[in-house]
Image (tube, rainbow, N blue to C red):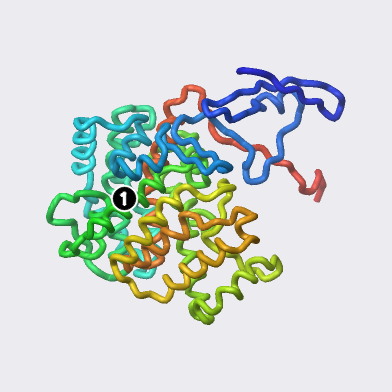
Amino acid sequence: MSDVAKLTMPDGKEITLPAYTGTEQEKCLDISALRKETGYVTFDPGFGNTCPSKSSITFLNGEAGILRYRGYSIEDLCEKSDFTSVMYLVIYGELPSEAELAEFNKNLAEHSKIKPQLLKLYESLPQDTHPMVLVSTMLAGLSAHYPQFTNPHDTDQVEQAIFIALGQILPIVSSAYCHGKGKEFNYPSEPISSYGSGLLKMMFGDDYEVDTDVEKILDELLILHADHEFNCSTSTARIVGSSQANLFASLSASVNALWGPLHGGANQKVIEMLEDIANDGGVEAIDKYLAMAKDKTSGFRLMGFGHRVYKNYDPRAKIIKKTCDKVIEKLGVEDPLLAVAQKLEAAALSDEYFTSRKLYPNVDFYSGIVYRALNIPTEMYTPLFALGRLCGWIAHWREQNLDPHARIGRPRQLYMGATERSL
């Protein structure tokens, strides 16, 4: 505690609140005793100003456009590292040595096969079931098939659960795609060189030729999605885990939180928006839709622009845009939706209305375009987000589980209902 703040209550009583400063100079007031001392709670819709716990995993400064995992900038990590190393970093706090990385990969490989009985869950679900339902169901199902690794207080069990979740999320996501296409799921015949290459081979077949630049951009996208502080799905992992629910149950809950169009489902909404524009005149209709976005009564929202936290250019978007343009040019993709996307991006970035409000393209805008260029269907975009974010959920669940001062999540309410009445 570096200082205190004084708060004067409506009745004139004055109390002091401990004030803390984080390692990146973020300021925080401790209100944990506020209700006990005053009878008041804070009113904070959406928890936009609420800090439920301390964390040392990710630093995010939305005003400055900064994102770091364990102190490393995402710019450095995307340029000089790989997704598997970043997973290790996010979960355990340091980049792995060669020996640690080899052991980590070995453990993931040993737990990379889904039990055949678990795969039979798909047989009970319709072919057109959204892949996020399948991913959530499969992760929850791990609790049934690995009950010996569900004690959150047993360090060895937790470590095994981590390897199972990380090892099986790739075939879980890929098999969800295969189920939707009515095709048989198969594992690659050779060891995979990366999550990106493994994903493409499991989805499209063992004979799929993985382009090195495509592999690189998928690796970048997974790194960029690895963690993002206390967002909706990560907060879900923490609050479910705070009840001492096991790792698999907490991860399944996080998948469901991610599914929403205001969170992980945003990249799918970007493509759906572009399809609407393409069907309404294409690039010639861009000005019309920009005008609608400015009109608060139109009901139209420009998806993939702006961010709840970033009040500057999304640093993740800056990185992925460069690789996105390179890959699209290399693949020679001719898609009217990509033309609409590029025109929309250029028009919005040259429009003072959007730039003055810091409504820049975000990572969801570019990730949807990349997946579209790779012939990945829109319903798979959010599962791919989950593929990258899984390590972040695990890291936060693990960090909280190791905290001796952690408490079960239990927000308060401001009751506005009927007062006591009789029948």
Instruction: Identify the image quadrant of the N terminus.
Output: top right
Name the spot of residue 238 as percent of width and height, x first: 48, 38
Asked if residue 345 can be seen in this view, the reply is: yes
Against 367, residue 23 (above or below) is above
Mark 1 Cα shell of 10 Å, populated few (<14), some (14-19), many (≥20): many
- Could you tell me residue 252's position as x and y percent? 41, 48
- Residue 334 x, y percent position in the rendering: 35, 75
Tell me which residue sits at (52%, 68%) in the image. 344
Q: Position of residue 41 (x, y in %)?
A: 72, 33
Three-letter amino acid code of the residue under disc 1:
Asp
209 displayed left or right of 408: left
Rendering quarter of residue 16: top right
Answer with the quarter of the image where residue 401 lies: top left
Query: In the figure, residue 19 lies in which quadrant?
Result: top right
| 65 sits to left or right of 112 | right
Query: Which residue in the structure is indicated by mark 1?
Result: 219
Identify the residue at image location x=53%, y=29%. Answer: 24
Q: Residue at x 35, y 41 (%)?
A: 77
Using the image, determine if residue 61 lies above or below residue 295: above
Task: Determine whether 200 is above or below 110 in the image.
Answer: below
